Image: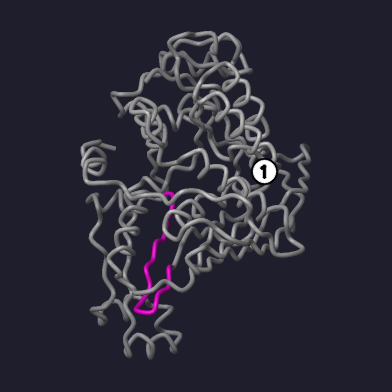
Amino acid sequence: MNIGFVGCGYTADLYMESIKRYSQLELVAVTDRNPERLSAFGNYHGVKTYATTEALLSHQNIELIVNLTNPNSHFEVTQMCLEAGKHVYSEKPMSVTFAEGQKLVDLAKSKNLYLSSAPCGILGETAQTLWKALRDNTIGTVRVVYAEIEDGPVQLQDPHIWRSPSGAPFPYRDEFQVGFPISHAAYYLTWFVAFFGPAKTVTSYSSCLWPDKTVVPGEPLHVANPDISVACVTFESGVVARLTCSLLGPHNHSMRIIGDKGILKVEECLNWSAPVFVDKYSRFKFRAQRYPIAERYPFIKAWFDPNYYVYPPVKKFSWKKRNARLRQDYARGIADLAQAIKQKQSARLSTDFCLHMTELVWAIQNITNKPYHVTTTCKPLHPLDDGALQEIRSIDW
């Protein structure tokens, strides 16, 4: 599959490192509206560059465009690509408003084109291991889920000095201005919809509690879009998930799926090699949880409790990779989409699935005065089969 990039910023380098591992993906050319950034990316990675998006889209051999522009440009660029007859995989969010997402989906369907978007973490090893544990009824009937995506006050972490391998600056202004729920809630929501089916309602609190996001002294940066949201999402299966997204609380990307036999835990959704922990209920555990020492020294209950263990992963990783802070294969969603296009089948991250996700993150950020009844739905996702898992195991990443 011949692909092209629109956007050569910070995220493009992450995608580029992943794409190199897929022999079936060929990056033909890239473009960016910033000539200096375009030149730096092209020279660093040795890829052909085009000065404009129109020029890139005129390339007949390019079948699939990866939209890596800033979030507020996603709608315009994706629309342009679809109108040019190209399939599109977009970085998250597919669009910053639900209405724009619907327009893109309608356009793609009218032209018989594929449209998909990140995040693709549900295709990762950690999510697939967790999904298998759920199918194996490891913790019984799932009742509720608690999940956090909290990155702390990024404006105090010197994001202005963060650089990608080719020298692109981290787009912290975009991160702040688009709203944290819009840009981050889908990391876990995609897992939940895969595990528990489409969502029915969203009840959310969302606000901007720290509007002054000034990073560089003398360059004031004030934002209005939310830096915190707390949402309760009900799913067709009856499961309820509470998802917190914020730039306020200390760094925490953990999740707990609570069933009537125990709990499944993941400490980091952005590390696809992270272990999945099983914490089965027991009288000892319930007693231990009542004492503060058990929280201060959790190894105490883990050491003495045989019901606390690591679920067998779908792929084994080294200790270093299991405990990495961030570790994702950004190209996996592109590879899955490319395979679907070639085989003329539905992609796992289908157009309807991505629109459903767009509606959910939009509702979490914008509908805060009453419960919101979700209007979209999607077909059930299916876990990776043995063949797909075997292919993933063969990729040395």
123 vs 372: above or below: above
Residue at the (71%, 42%) spot, across then down: 177
Q: Residues within 10 Å of mark 1 (few under 14, many from 20)?
A: some
Q: Is residue 219 magenta?
A: no
Q: Nearer the viewer, residue 142 or 284?
A: 142
**Residue kind at label 1, given as amino acid type:** Phe
Split into 4 quadrants, where in the image is the C terminus? Answer: top left
Q: Which residues are magenta?
A: 257-270
Residue at the (58%, 31%) spot, across then down: 169
307 vs 46: above or below: below
Residue at the (67%, 62%) spot, across then down: 204
Q: Nearer the viewer, residue 132 or 325?
A: 132
Picture coordinates of residue 159, whole percent (x, y): 60, 41
Q: Nearer the viewer, residue 211 or 33?
A: 33
Q: Disc count in the image?
A: 1
Residue beneath disc 1 = 98
Check disc 1 and report its element: helix, strand or loop: helix
Left or right: 163 with respect to 318? right
Picture coordinates of residue 143, whole percent (x, y): 46, 74
Q: How is the image coloured?
A: one colour
230 vs 286: above or below: above
> Where, by quadrant of the figure, is residue 191 drawn?
bottom left
Picture coordinates of residue 43, whole percent (x, y): 46, 13
5 vs 96: above or below: above
Split into 4 quadrants, where in the image is the N terminus? Answer: top left
Picture coordinates of residue 336, whole percent (x, y): 37, 35
Q: Is residue 267 magenta?
A: yes
Residue at the (43%, 68%) spot, across then down: 257
